[in-house]
Amino acid sequence: MNTLAQQQPRGLQWSALIISIAITLAIGFTASYFTRPEIPGWYAGLQKPSFSPPNWLFGPVWTMLYIFIGIAAYLVWQRRDGSTAYSNARKIYIAQLALNFSWSIVFFGLHQMLGAFVVIILLLISIIGCMVYFSHFSKTAALLLIPYLLWVSFASVLNFSIYLLNK
């Protein structure tokens, strides 16, 4: 049962915030082990659409997004309770982190552009799910995921376009 005390935000816990951000940054950094080696060779050799951003842009954008994702997760964690809604929010959050990480492996590690497109569509669905469940705990947390949703939407179009140009 939710009490008013459980629904109110708790005081800022810097260590928890830092850990939340560090988790997302670590996932991105680990995924880059599959990405970085493929940029100058395999990825450079692919046909890309005219709207493909320069390679240097991806690192800063993803870093910013991972920070936003970590902050959003922290805001939800801060208002955690024993509800089914919180349990579902946590599960879908973990699923989207796993899909986010998996995309790099499938696209860059395995060179499976169509498979990566399937993963990124599932990622989009999970981001939307996170936004819905996060909004039950923090509207700010849900709003922090909008740039992530927009970037992954763009990345989906880019992924599919690269697939079409190189199949």
Image (cartoon, rainbow, N blue to C red):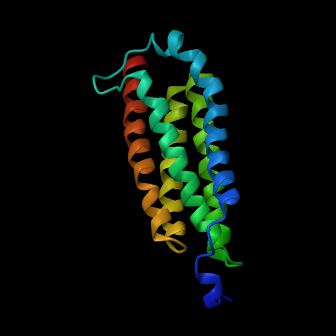
Compared with residue 163, is residue 23 higher up or lower down, i.e. above or below?
below
Q: Please indicate, yes or no, whether residue 65 appears anywhere in the rendered image.
A: yes
Left or right placement of residue 22 versus residue 146 in this view: right
Q: Is residue 140 left or right of residue 54?
A: right
The quadrant in which residue 48 appears is top left
Quick check: 12 above or below 125? below
Quadrant including the N terminus? bottom right
Q: How many marks?
A: 0
Q: Position of residue 151 (x, y in %)?
A: 41, 42
Image point 61% across, 41% down: which residue?
25
Instruction: Looking at the picture, tell me which residue is in the foreground, 124 or 15.
Output: 15
Residue 92 appears at what percent x and percent y? 61, 59
Q: Quadrant of the C terminus?
A: top left
Q: Decide if residue 122 is in sight here.
A: no
In-front residue for pair 61/131:
61
Q: Residue at x 56, y 56 (%)?
A: 71
As drawn, which residue projects farthest toward the left?
A: 50
What residue is at 31 percent from the left and 23 percent from the top? Answer: 49
Q: Eyeballing the image, is 60 above or below 122?
A: above
Residue 139 spot, x, y in % from top left: 46, 70
Give the vertical position of 144 relative to 80 (above or below).
above
Q: x%, y% of residue 7?
A: 59, 82
Residue at horizontal 45 percent and vertical 30 percent from the top: 58
